[in-house]
Image (cartoon, rainbow, N blue to C red):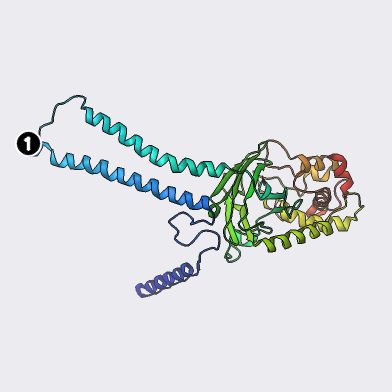
């Protein structure tokens, strides 16, 4: 039995070692056993790293100096060696020293820190401006100017739910991958204008040295100038609710030529995929489209089964609002429910997407054929706005 336990223990150690060996640095994200700050691909990020080490070094010198003198004094002037305490009052030299020296240290630390903070806040003369909106739990991007002017989309976590629920092996970019990254050109000053539609979020990309809160009802801004092409990853850094851990940020930095080509492609796709809210859709079309919209925006809270999460998110299967007159459900989806986790989707989804999602919920699970108004047209949503 002892021998068997030893073999099993060795096997467990080998399996653990193999698992650790398979973990690799994430391009544009955290590294294995990373102890330091990110090196950064912007001047602000590098300045932040330099400030960190400069201030840490000064603090360490002060710590060693102060406690070194203190411990030496305790050891060298202890009573057992016959030391007697000196008696003196208001020594001018000591008073001047412990006032002037800390003042010089504070100024030496404050000057470079102030320079960096001022640079962080200088969002003037950008080459590109992007409006970023935080939602529970995704990011919305809208290009205000430049080659991609008018392009807007939602960026949502693309890690499969099966991985999150431990039914599949974790991927290389687990919880740090999205369906649509923010795309910007290299060596251009990008201004990020931030707000939120529900609660406070925070847009943070360590490689850019950027972290700025997104607050409902306020516009705040920050900026970065990426000096390398590639993918760079961050996360919402403000506790914002149940799926706070599931709203990553991915920024793809392209060359100017590739960025221009991407912008042109996005404009063509937007034009080709533009929904016509005046079109009369069939029930089958709405249900098929609604299943996609539900899967991208609603499934995390209300679940694929429509049963919700007891105590947190209500079930839609058999819900009286879903089975009742369509007007109430349209109002709820458009405006949310204040005081609950139900967010307003009026600013996130267009009228066709909202109509499709509502129609899907009214015809899915056990709701099929049971409620009123089984079909909701985009025109109904437009009228309710």
* 96 relative to 158 in the view: left or right: left
Front residue (pair 309, 261): 261
In the rendered image, is residue 301 in sight?
no
Q: Tally the marks.
A: 1
Q: Quadrant of residue 345?
A: top right
Q: Residue at x 76, y 60 (%)?
A: 264
Residue lying furthest front:
125
Residue lying furthest left:
82
Q: Position of residue 227 (x, y in %)?
A: 57, 58
Q: Residue at x 60, y 57 (%)?
A: 187
Q: Quadrant of residue 336?
A: top right
302 relative to 108, above or below: below
In the rendered image, is residue 233 in sight?
yes
Residue lying furthest right:
280
Image quarter in which the N terminus is found: bottom left
* 221 relative to 80 in the view: left or right: right
Q: Position of residue 199 (x, y in %)?
A: 64, 40
Element type at mark 1: loop
Q: Residue at x 21, y 25 (%)?
A: 90
Q: Quadrant of residue 200?
A: top right
Q: Position of residue 167 (x, y in %)?
A: 61, 64
Image quarter in which the C terminus is found: top right
Front residue (pair 162, 224): 224
Front residue (pair 127, 280): 127
171 relative to 242, above or below: below
Residue lying furthest top:
89
* 160 relative to 59 in the view: left or right: right
Q: Which residue in the protein does label 1 denote?
A: 82
* 319 relative to 38 in the view: left or right: right
Q: Position of residue 61 (x, y in %)?
A: 30, 46
Front residue (pair 195, 330): 195
């Amino acid at each position: 039995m002892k021998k068997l336990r030893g073999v099993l223990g060795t096997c467990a150690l080998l399996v653990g070692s193999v698992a650790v060996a398979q973990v690799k640095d994430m391009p544009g994200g955290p590294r294995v056993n990373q102890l330091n700050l990110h090196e950064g691909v912007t001047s602000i990020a590098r300045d932040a790293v330099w400030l960190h080490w400069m201030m840490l070094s000064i603090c360490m010198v002060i710590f060693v100096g102060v406690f070194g003198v203190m411990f030496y004094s305790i050891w060298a002037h202890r009573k057992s060696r016959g030391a007697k305490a000196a008696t003196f009052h208001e020594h001018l030299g000591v008073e001047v020293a412990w006032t002037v020296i800390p003042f010089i240290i504070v100024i030496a630390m404050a000057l470079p820190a102030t320079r960096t903070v001022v640079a962080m806040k200088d969002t003037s003369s950008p080459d590109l401006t992007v409006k970023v909106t935080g939602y529970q739990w995704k990011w919305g991007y809208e290009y205000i100017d430049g080659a991609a002017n008018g392009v807007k989309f939602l960026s949502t976590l693309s890690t499969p739910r099966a991985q999150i629920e431990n039914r599949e092996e974790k991927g290389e970019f687990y919880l740090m991958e999205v369906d649509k990254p923010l795309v910007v050109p290299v060596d251009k000053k990008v201004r990020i204008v931030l707000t939120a539609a529900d609660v406070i979020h925070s847009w943070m990309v360590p490689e850019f040295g950027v972290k700025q809160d997104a607050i409902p009802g306020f516009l705040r801004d920050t900026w970065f100038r990426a000096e390398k092409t590639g993918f760079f990853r961050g996360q919402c850094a403000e506790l914002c609710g149940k799926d706070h851990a599931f709203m990553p940020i991915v920024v793809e930095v392209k060359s100017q030529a590739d960025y221009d080509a991407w912008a042109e492609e996005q404009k063509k796709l937007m034009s080709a995929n533009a929904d016509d809210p005046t079109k009369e859709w069939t029930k089958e079309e709405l249900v098929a489209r609604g299943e996609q919209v539900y899967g991208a925006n609603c499934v995390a809270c209300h679940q694929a089964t429509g049963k919700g999460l007891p105590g947190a998110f209500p079930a839609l299967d058999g819900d009286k609002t879903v089975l009742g007159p369509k007007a109430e459900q349209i109002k709820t989806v458009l405006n949310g429910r204040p005081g609950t986790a139900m967010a307003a989707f009026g600013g996130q989804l267009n009228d066709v997407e909202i109509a499709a999602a509502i129609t899907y919920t009214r015809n899915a699970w056990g709701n099929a054929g049971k409620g009123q108004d089984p079909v909701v047209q985009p025109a109904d949503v437009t009228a309710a706005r």
